[in-house]
Structures are given as C-alpha cells and as structure tokens.
Amino acid sequence: MKEPLIVLENINIRTRDRSILSIPRFELFPGEALGVMGPNGAGKSTLLKTMALLDLPGEGTVFYRGKKVTDHSVLDVRRRFAVALQQSLLLDMTVHQNIAIGLKLRHRSRREINMKVEHWMEVFKISHLARKQALHLSGGEAQRVNLARAMILEPEVLFLDEPFSALDFPTKVQLLKDIKQVVSKTNTTTVFISHDLTEIKYFTQRMAIIMGGEIKQAGSTAEVLSEPNAYAASFIGEWSRLLT
Amino acid sequence: MMELLFEGLIKAFEMIISGDPEIVEITLRTLRVSMTAILVSTLLGLPAGMLLGLARFPGRKLILVLINIGMGLPPVVAGLWITIFLWRSGPLGDLSLLYTPAAIVIAQTLVSLPIVTGLTATAFQQIDEKMILQIKALGATRWQLVWILMKEARLAILAAIIAGFGRVVAEVGAAMMVGGNISGETRILTTSIVMEVSKGNFDIALALSFIIMAIAFLITFCLTFLQQRKRPE
C-alpha cells in the first residue's frame, strides 16, 4: 500500500452557527485521480482549500508526505501544488505572462520560464495566443491558459475545482480529454471537484461524496456509483444507476 | 468678458516668457508643496486603502464611514483644525510650523488623504476573493500577493491619485488659513489668485489661473497616460 501524499486529520472548520467541514481522517494517495462530489454548500471548495493549503484549518492537522504542515512550512508545501478554479481568474497581462507567473514567483531563470511556457502553450494548443491580452480570451481559451498556468508548475497535486462547468459541451469534452491525457502522461495526482457525474466517471478512479461538511462515502468511483450508500444515493440517485 | 479672458491669456504668456521671478517662485512653491502633499497622501493612503479593502477587522466599517466623510471635508474646516493644533499655544505649537509651506503640505495632505485612501479601499474591495485565492495558489508570498494585487488594481489606484491631486491643486481655503499667503514664503498660486481678485487685478488672477490649469493639465495628463498605457491586444 502506498504512503498517502496528503492526510487530513480531525479537521473541523466552523462558522459561528454551523459546521463547514468535519473530517476525522481523509487521505489522498500519489498518482490517483480523486473525484469529489456533493450538493451546493456541502463543503467541497472548503475541502479543496484545506487540502491545497490555501487556508490552514484552525482545528485539525494536515500532513504532507507524513509531515505535519505548519505555518512555517505551508508556503513551501503549497508551492508543490497547483489549483485551477471554475473561473479562469487570469491576471490583466498577456497569455505568456499569465502562464509564466507561478515560475516568476519562484524566481526561476528567464530562460527556464520561456522554455516551459513555450512547452505548455504547445501542450494546451494555445501558442498562437501568447501575446494576446488574457482578459480578451474566450471561455475555452481562458480555461486552457488557466490549466497551462497550473501545469507549468509541475505540481505533485493538481486541484481542479469545477474547471469545465462554465464551458459549452464540445469545449468541455475536448478540454477534459486534453487534461486527462496530460495528467496521465505526467502521473500527476489530481483532486477533481465536479457536479457532473460523467466527468467524475471519465476522469477519476476514486471518489468521495461530501454532504453537510462530512464525507459520507469514499471508495473506487465504480463502487460508489454502483453501490451508493443511503447518503450518496440521495444525492447521485438515479443518475448513477443510469450511467452504470 | 472675452476681452478679459484674452488679456489674462496674454498676461500669462508675458509672465511666463519674461520669467517674472515672483511668478516663477510662486509656481515652483506650488509645485513643491502640491507634489509633496500628494506623495505623502499616496504613501499613507495606498497601504491604508489596501488594508481597509482587503482585511476584515473590528471597526473597519466605521473607519470607512469616517474616510467617506473625510472625502467631503471642507478645506477651511481642515485648515481651522490644523491652525488650532499648530497655534503657538496649541498641542503642536512648539514645532513652529504655522505659516510655513510645511503647514500647507499638512493641510493639503489632510484633504487629499481620505480621497486616496477611500478610492484605493474601494478598488481593493472590488477584487474577487477567488482571485486572491488563485494568486495564493500560484505560490505567492504575502508581499508577492500584495504586489500582484496592486498591479491588478493599477487603473483604480492611479485614478485615486489623480483625484487626490485634483483636490490638492485646487485647495485654497486651508492653504490660506495655515499658510497666511505670505509673500516669498507661503504664497502659492491659488492663494495668489484669491488675493489678486480681492485687489481687482483680474488680468493677473486670470493669468495665474491659466498657469495653475496648465500645471494641473500636465500632471493629470502624465498620470492618465501612465494609467492608460497601451496594452498589446
């Protein structure tokens, strides 16, 4: 059994009157593609923020490769991850500069940055957009830039928070195919949050259903879809049976 | 009316071309005082505005309300308070700043600071919280995050500085009160205009107004140029 890459332990995140996330233990293994599904407000994005170390939880511990992540080590560990959110959230600069920004923040040499930007623009078929202002791109183009900006960091874990939900169907399918190919080729561990069962089924080997801030079922994607427990069934219900 | 405007324009040209030492001195002092005031306002207002726009802490809303009130603060009221503070028997009387250019800088800073701070805070409040999250996710340190956000909000930041500069350069009431319009010491273009009008020298007042408008135009032009620099398509 592989050692987990990330472990969440006794995580409790609360607002004044309700629990946002309550996870006794949850693990992410190297090389896997983990899907996370749940209704709106279930805590999916909070789970992603916690796992991606964008916020350290007030209560509970995050372990990375067996070591506890602290205030001191959080930036160093966070820099091993990459996140692509639903909105592409590109900066007001050119496509080339947007893709380069993460490496610039890590003070990499200009030569290395240019070489990698060229490579990842080619992978995501956006080389022709290099000098274009990022805020003038179409939704599909912007999301390709967003993914290139994440993948250029060569992350150990790639977090995808519904990155295709705002795209039209053909664009979504093409992009899903492309990112799956890239992730498989680079053997990048991926956490994929989605509302779309077909995306989860296509992309992930393991999935978790989160509801009310708690993980109600986790297991292989095929298993969760074919034998959802009562909680999971109440959310994915008939749809999962139609797909299996 | 047109004749008066024309005379004022001619007079302005004469004053500039002849290099009238008093006008040169007043113009340079105006520039020095106004630029110092807007620089101080920017240095104080930018970080304060960013903090108010991005951070959440108790009392933040109250501070924002006070800043918005400050944006409409009548300059004479600001002048009055500064005079009270700098008056010989006042709390800061020992500094002997009243009727000096420094007092005018303080007054102009006081009236422009809420504008720079308030507009900067608004600019940063409008930044999508997810954008901040995304920049953090790209591996930015706290200072790198601040730098990127400043670049993202640069149009609004420059607009705040332009608005603050407009207030500074147009300010007369407070400058008159704390500076005293002393010839060779604290006389600036706006206070000179008021004085010349009171003396009935409309041509000189108009000439001075053209000079101050030219300064305001040039500086605002430069700032706007900086703000609207052409970006590649």
Image: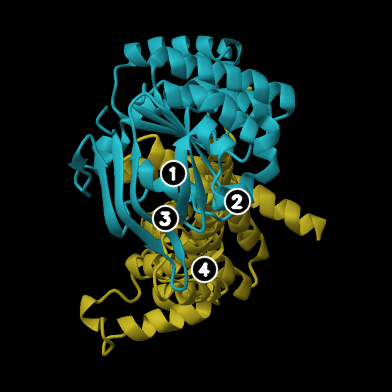
For the residues labelled 3 and 1, the Cα–Cα distance comes to 33 Å
| Chain with colour cyan in the figure | A
Residue A192 visible in the shown view: yes
Image quarter of the C terminus of chain B: top right
Left or right for B97, reference A33: left
Q: Nearer the viewer, residue B168 or A177?
A: A177
Q: Is residue B77 above or below residue A30?
A: below
Instruction: Provide the residue designation for mark 1.
Output: A48
Instruction: Specify the amino acid type for callout 3.
Output: Leu
For the residues labelled 4 and 1, the Cα–Cα distance comes to 61 Å
**Mark closer to the chain start, 1 or 2:** 2
Left or right for B210, reference B138: right
Query: Is disc 4 in contact with disc 2, using a CB cutoff of under 8 Å?
Result: no
Element type at marker 1? Answer: helix
Given this view, does label 4 or label 2 mark the residue nearer the observer? 2
**Residue at 81% across / 56% down in the picture?**
B2
Element type at marker 3? Answer: helix
Instruction: Provide the residue designation for mark 3.
Output: B46
Instruction: Specify the amino acid type for callout 2.
Output: Pro
For the residues labelled 3 and 2, the Cα–Cα distance comes to 41 Å
Q: Nearer the viewer, residue A124 or B226?
A: A124
